[in-house]
Image: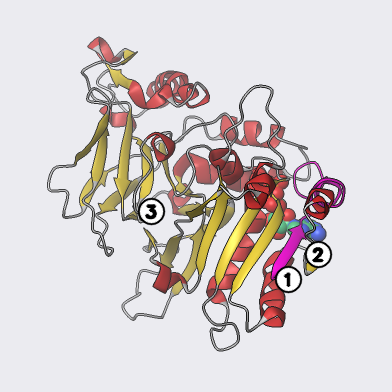
Amino acid sequence: MSLLLVYNPVCGSSSGREIAEQEVLPLLAKHGIVPAQVAGTQYAGHAGILVLEFLEKMSPHSDHTIILVSGDGTLHEIINALHERKSSEIPVCTIKLVLVPGGTANALHSSLFPPSPGSETTLSAVHAYLSSSSSLKPLAIAKTIIQAADDSSSTGGRTSILSAVVTSTSLHACILHDAEALRATVPGLDRFKLAAAQNATRWYNAHLRLLPSTRVQSSPVLQYDALLGRFVAAPNADTPVELAGPFAYMLSTVNVDRLEPTFRITPLQRTYPPSPPTTMDVVIVRPQRDPSLSGTGDAQRELFKDKVWAVMGGAYQDGVHIAFAYGAEGKVEPASKGQPVVEYFRVGGWEWIPGDDDERAYLVCADGAILTIPTGGKAVSRVLEGQELGFNISVYSL
Ligand SMILES: Nc1ncnc2c1ncn2[C@@H]1O[C@H](COP(=O)(O)OP(=O)(O)OP(=O)(O)O)[C@@H](O)[C@H]1O
């Protein structure tokens, strides 16, 4: 049987090894299952190498199951390593993932198995794997290409990265960037809070182009209409939709409705799952839609910050942030007929073109990894099809 168990011993509260040895392996043993290999990662980046070595060893099998005890970052490394492998050495394969949450946020696992009071979820995916009635959900994978200003050839001046969870710019990317710099001095999740406070009033000067999906089953740019409670085609949705900045928030997700167990930032990924999964959900906040703002100065930014964070707090209340709109005099209210505070789109991809004068708009976050767009360049992100990905990947879910 081509079954690999990988654990990250340092993710989350450093209990990956304990979970693997004391919970996962005994449960498998009860069902007479022994993995062909059990391995802990020994350094950042090791997970991808472990997986590639395993696939090579198990050749000519092409169907592999990987039980992964980690957070989202370790999965991110594996997906990128698989995509970058030499297909002459490891041909196209099928990976079935059994996720065991060992990380800090576990966005993908908590989206697949949302926490419910009193329920134990650590081994949910292992139970799904062992069950005859489990389902396998194909993963959508986004590829983001960082293009230099002079990138006219198909290969030159580019870097690319895959995401299985989130790709972002603006506040989310800056928080992840700054929190990393605080890692040595501020322990635990407090560094994210501090990084959020440091960036709370910042706006990002950029242009965003939302792209329709041109995949096998094409799909126009869709926008969520909170009053109708459904997606509708954006105007001229078969062509790119152009959005001018500044932006306070811009983030896109695949596969997940939440980035932490209770932070449902893209709730429609679960309420109205994309089918087939060749799109991503995009959440945007653009301050200048607020009719009460009279400028871009510090006082206006403070006012906007208080207002928008009250709305975004709705992500922690089952994702109600997407229902708020500007009412009379810019007061924000749920289910109002005014302009939505949060713009919510479902797209095939996007292009983010930072303004020359705003260095913070040049940051892009892909599943926690930070990339910097070169001056005059742009980031282009879109969901890949199986053939472009070079392997098939699905996860055990409910
Ligand atoms: N033995 C190791 N020593 C140091 N770093 C490691 C080791 N093994 C893996 N890593 C690194 O640990 C990082 C964090 O792992 P991961 O993202 O899975 O957990 P997390 O950050 O706690 O969870 P989440 O991403 O869900 O918030 C990964 O980026 C990976 O490169």
Q: Nearer the viewer, residue 234 or 307?
A: 234
Quadrant location, the N terminus: bottom right
- Which sits earlier in the primary sequence, circle 3 or circle 1? 1
Of the residues shown, which amino acid type is indicated by label 1? Leu
Q: Nearer the viewer, residue 356 or 231?
A: 231
The residue to which callout 2 is attached is 39
Residue at point 21%, 18% (across, down):
337
In the image, which is nearer the foreground, mark 3 or mark 1? Answer: 3
Quadrant location, the C terminus: top right
Q: Position of residue 283 (x, y in %)?
A: 38, 38
- Which sits earlier in the primary sequence, circle 2 or circle 1? 2
Verify CB contact (< 8 Å) between mark 3 and mark 2.
Answer: no
Residue 200: tell me if it is visible: yes
Identify the image quadrant of residue 51: bottom right
The residue most toward the left is 236
As measured in the structure, the alpha-carbon distance from the residue carrying label 3 to the one carrying label 2 is 31 Å
The residue to which callout 1 is attached is 50
Q: Position of residue 390 (x, y in %)?
A: 47, 74
Of the residues shown, which amino acid type is indicated by label 2? Ala
In the picture shown, does residue 304 fall above or below 221?
A: above
Q: Nearer the viewer, residue 396 or 19?
A: 396
Magenta highlight range: 1-24
